[in-house]
Image: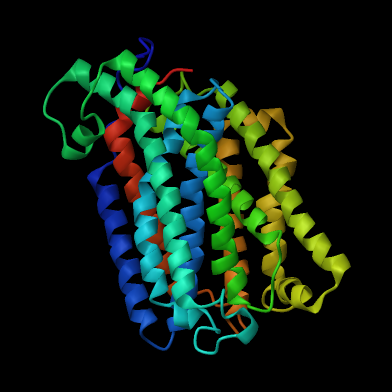
Amino acid sequence: MTDPAAPAHAAPPPAKTLRRVLWGLLLLGGATFLIAAYGPNRLRAWQIFLVNFLFWSGMAQGGLVFVAVYDLTRARWGEPVRTLALGMGGFLPVSFFLLFVLFAGAEILFPWARQPIPEKKMWLNLPFLFSRDAIGLLGLYSVALAYLYYSLRPRVGAELVREGGRLPWTIALLVKGWRGEEAERERSRRFLATLAPLFIVCYGLVFSLLGFDWVMALDPQFYSTLFGAYFFMSSFYLGLAGTVITAALAQKRFGLEKIIGKSQFHDLGKFLLAFCMVTGDFLWSQYAVIWYGNLPEETGFIILRTKTAPWSPLAWAVLIIGFIGPFLVLLSRRAKENPVILGAVAFFIAVGLWLERYLLVVPSLSRSPELPLGWIELFISLGFLSAFLLTYLGFGARFQKILRSSRV
């Protein structure tokens, strides 16, 4: 329903200049990757590609899982925030395409690709790894996009019926076979009630598999049954951080001050604090089991990252930026209610989790005595950031009226 109190002077779509800058950064990142991937720095190109694939795919998927959790608990405190989180789903088709690009560098990333490990070759072989991950992501992303479709359809259709006019083909497809607002709302409610638990379970299974295949398998001597759970929980934590950042930015951009206020940010802050603690507990549980078990196949992974240069300072940075710092700040009610402070905390969480993905991936591959961070990593990472923002801004440009008409 349209909120009559919603501001009529909301900001226009993102400026063409911003889009041109993002497209330029995307082309720069793509060119850097292609040049580096087939040159002497190919390992650096592929490992940073993997880091960003895991990070941005996790953020996009985590944002949609937040929506499913919100719906499953029948929450009503943040409908505009829910809509903003839906926008992250625009990156999922890009993520699926990037998985196929990633497989082109599999022989560079996986040491067992050319020298199979006899006792693990049934599981650690490229055809099987490619098949299970592609099928898993295809199934998960199909459910996610179905969730996105049924979440948007009744509200988009209602707006278009009121406005009329010719539609872009993407929007026309979204509202094809329109049955009327009430019928569509009831139909979407039923579908979402069924899809939400299925979506969350699929997410846990598939992202556990991604953690096993694209992080743990980089070091074939390391294994942990807890790692998959930590990986999908940290991706959800990342999605929450992304949702907070977008809410803080969109409050001003789309004129949403009256519908995303202190109450909504306070609830978001509590959510972020809760999953900061839950994800931190998963991290500690992983470390504690490895510490008291003291098994060589497990301790090497931890010792490399926490006790040796150049990785140990990075491990402390991840712990402080991604977990301890946010936990201490989010204890304050005032901090949770302030969009600037909460947005800054979420930004630092995202930075901390990017460094965490880097720390999970790169030490298993790099044998450099110096931290492999330079212009290659910067430009490729900016390319991924640009791809994510372009898909998100495309969502915002199409559905900003839905954002402004959302009400709590």
Quarter placement of the N terminus = top left
Residue 250 shown left or right of residue 364 in the figure: left
Front residue (pair 225, 18): 225
Residue at point 32%, 49% (across, down): 390
Residue found at the far top of this picture: 4
On screen, residue 266 above or below 59: above
Residue found at the far right of this picture: 292
Residue at point 38%, 58% (across, down): 96
Q: Quadrant of residue 86?
A: top left
Find residue 288 and report its horizontal and vertical position in percent. Answer: 83, 60
Q: Quadrant of residue 363?
A: bottom right
Residue found at the far left of this picture: 166
Residue at point 60%, 52% (across, down): 232
Residue at point 37%, 67% (across, down): 100
Find residue 283 and report its horizontal and vertical position in percent. Answer: 73, 56
Front residue (pair 350, 190): 190
> Residue 251: in sight, yes or no?
no
Q: Disc count in the image?
A: 0
Q: Quadrant of residue 12?
A: top left
Find residue 265 and report its horizontal and vertical position in percent. Answer: 57, 28
> Residue 400: in sight, yes or no?
yes
Find residue 364 and report its horizontal and vertical position in percent. Answer: 61, 77
On screen, residue 24 above or below 75: below
Front residue (pair 24, 281): 281
Residue 327 shown left or right of residue 24 in the figure: right
